[in-house]
Image: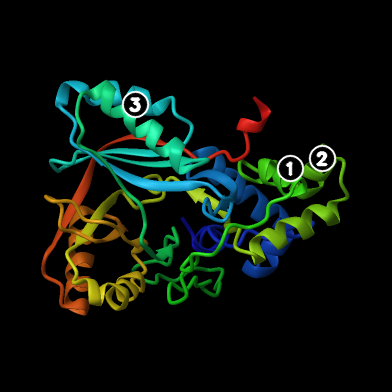
């Protein structure tokens, strides 16, 4: 991976251009050509480094309910539950982790009633009541933004300036009220929540499909970004293929009166992609959650130690993924097509 690859990946994770010719815009930012930027991004898509290129939406802004769920699942029921969750569209992520609470999954649904219905079904199938919903009480950060700057800052013949994505102002740090989505919004959301067309002019292709003018697609997309309905517009990476092979769910036992101030400190670490305050359980005292991505488990541990030093919190645990059971993107407003 050379300097141009790194510069492009640093940009497109959060700021894929919303312009008529986005690869020309990328070329201007990186000192390359439109064809070269296009070919590099296409290569990342074909190699699986880029899993999806499009909009990442704020489920709360769209009026959906989301939660993180923790479950104690007997070993003989793990695959049964994994198969069940695989078939539920609102379950976007599911991991087997190294803890008594061994299954952790995210659930997004159209209503709280639907969330409770899914959890009741799960409890019945696996024969346990120990399936818990841990919704976010405070959101400090959602910014899956991997730093591709070279560790040793080696020389490169292109002499490209580094494009930095700051974590000091993490995206999605405010919980806003639901956005008044209209039918035009729904049409464009359905097109942007998957992969945008593999084209030098992707927005023109979306416009043709919707029978809109391209300018309307660009304005509507930017409007959704400006109003934080689209939390970020860019590339969703397969972090393992991108070199970030380890991730840990770092959980912290923090006094309630310090949760807000310390949550902000934890969120300021570049390696932390998600930071939330969530409810505790009788045998789960941890109320701050930090998702940490690094190049090794040892590096994850080093980040946790730095956070502990910065916050003074010593009661924490790291849960590593034993197996990724599901990873997908939520598809909004698809139920209206049924």
Instruction: Give the Cα distance between marks 1 and 3.
Output: 32 Å
> Is the residue under label 2 in contact with that under label 3 (CB below 8 Å)?
no
Question: Of helix, strand and loop, which one carries label 2?
Answer: helix
Residue 91 in view of the camera: no
Q: Which residue, given by chain and number where applicable, does mark 1 sit on?
A: 187
Task: Decide which of 98, 239 is in the foreground and name it.
Answer: 98
Q: Which residue, given by chain and number where applicable, does mark 3 sit on?
A: 121
**Image spot of residue 126 (x, y percent):** 23, 24
- Residue drawn where x is 16% and y is 42% of the image: 98
Instruction: Give the Cα distance between marks 3 and 2.
Output: 38 Å
Q: Residues within 10 Å of mark 3 (few under 14, many from 20)?
A: few
- Residue drawn where x is 45% and y is 36% of the image: 114
Q: Earlier in the sequence, mark 2 or mark 1?
A: 1
Q: Which residue, given by chain and number where applicable, does mark 2 sit on?
A: 210
**Image spot of residue 106 (x, y percent):** 38, 43
Looking at the image, is mark 3 or mark 2 nearer the viewer? Answer: 3
């Amino acid at each position: 991976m050379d300097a141009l690859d790194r510069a492009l990946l640093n940009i497109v994770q959060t700021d894929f251009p919303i312009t008529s010719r986005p690869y020309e815009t990328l070329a201007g930012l990186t000192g390359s050509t439109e064809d070269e930027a296009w070919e590099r991004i296409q290569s990342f898509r074909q190699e699986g480094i880029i899993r999806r290129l499009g909009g990442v939406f704020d489920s709360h802004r769209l009026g959906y309910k989301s939660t993180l769920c923790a479950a104690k699942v007997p070993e003989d029921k793990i695959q049964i539950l994994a198969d069940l969750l695989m078939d539920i569209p609102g379950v976007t992520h599911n991991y087997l982790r190294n803890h008594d609470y061994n299954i952790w999954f995210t659930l997004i649904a159209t209503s709280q009633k639907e969330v409770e219905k899914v959890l009741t079904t799960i409890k019945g199938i696996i024969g346990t009541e120990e399936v818990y919903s841990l919704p976010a009480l405070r959101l400090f950060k959602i910014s899956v933004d991997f730093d591709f700057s070279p560790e040793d800052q080696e020389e490169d013949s292109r002499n490209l300036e580094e494009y930095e994505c700051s974590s000091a102002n993490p995206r999605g740090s405010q919980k806003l009220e639901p956005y008044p989505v209209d039918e035009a919004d729904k049409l464009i959301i359905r097109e942007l929540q998957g992969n945008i067309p593999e084209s030098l002019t992707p927005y023109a292709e979306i416009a043709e499909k919707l029978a809109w003018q391209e300018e309307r697609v660009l304005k509507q997309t930017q409007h959704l970004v400006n109003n934080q309905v689209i939390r970020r517009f860019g590339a969703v990476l397969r972090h393992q293929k991108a070199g970030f092979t380890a991730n840990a769910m770092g959980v912290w036992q923090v006094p309630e009166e310090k949760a807000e101030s310390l949550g902000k400190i934890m969120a300021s670490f570049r390696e932390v992609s998600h930071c939330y305050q969530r409810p505790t359980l009788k045998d789960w005292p941890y109320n701050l959650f930090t998702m940490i991505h690094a190049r090794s488990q040892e590096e994850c541990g080093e980040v946790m130690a730095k956070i502990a030093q910065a916050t003074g919190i010593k009661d924490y645990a790291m849960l590593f993924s034993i197996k990724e059971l599901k990873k997908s993107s939520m598809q909004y407003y698809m139920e209206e097509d049924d």
